[in-house]
Image: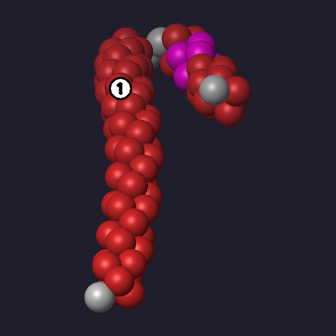
Amino acid sequence: MQASLEAEARGKAEAMRVKKKLEQDINELEVALDTANRGRADAEKNIKKYQQQMRELQQQVSSSVTRGDDGLIESTFHAVYAGHKIGRSSERVS
């Protein structure tokens, strides 16, 4: 009888240890999920910003082509290229 009580106590202690470990794992996964969701939200915000910039630049280029303004097209290209390089370097730093 004593042996079965001791075995039950050991089993219960092991179950509690496993439960505590699983709860810790869940907490860590929740933190990782929150971090991933924040990263995704930031990426979506950047994508929307870049899409808007592209729409604006496409409109500028279209109106420049219609007017035949080659100087504006060239300066727009250089601005886009410089912005792309700046955006890429700041993404690496973050």
How many numbered discs? 1
Q: State which quadrant residue 9 falls in.
A: bottom left
Quadrant placement of the C terminus:
top right
Q: Which residues are magenta?
A: 75-80
Q: Position of residue 41 (x, y in %)?
A: 34, 31
Residue 86 is left or right of residue 68, and the answer is right
Q: Position of residue 89 (x, y in %)?
A: 69, 27
Identity of the amino acid at label 1?
Answer: Lys
Above or below, 70 relative to 5 = above
Q: State which quadrant residue 15 falls in.
A: bottom left
Per the image, the residue denoted by label 1 is 45
Residue occupying the point 39% across, 66% down: 13
Q: Let me know if residue 22 appears in the view.
A: no
Above or below, 91 relative to 78 = below
Residue occupying the point 42% across, 62% down: 17
Quadrant placement of the N terminus:
bottom left
Q: Identify the main secondary structure in magenta.
A: helix
User: Callout 1: few (<14), some (14-19), or many (20+) C-alpha neighbours within 10 Å?
Assistant: few
Q: State which quadrant residue 59 falls in.
A: top left
Viewer-closest of 79 and 36: 36
Residue 74 is left or right of residue 43, and the answer is right
Is residue 48 highlighted in magenta?
no
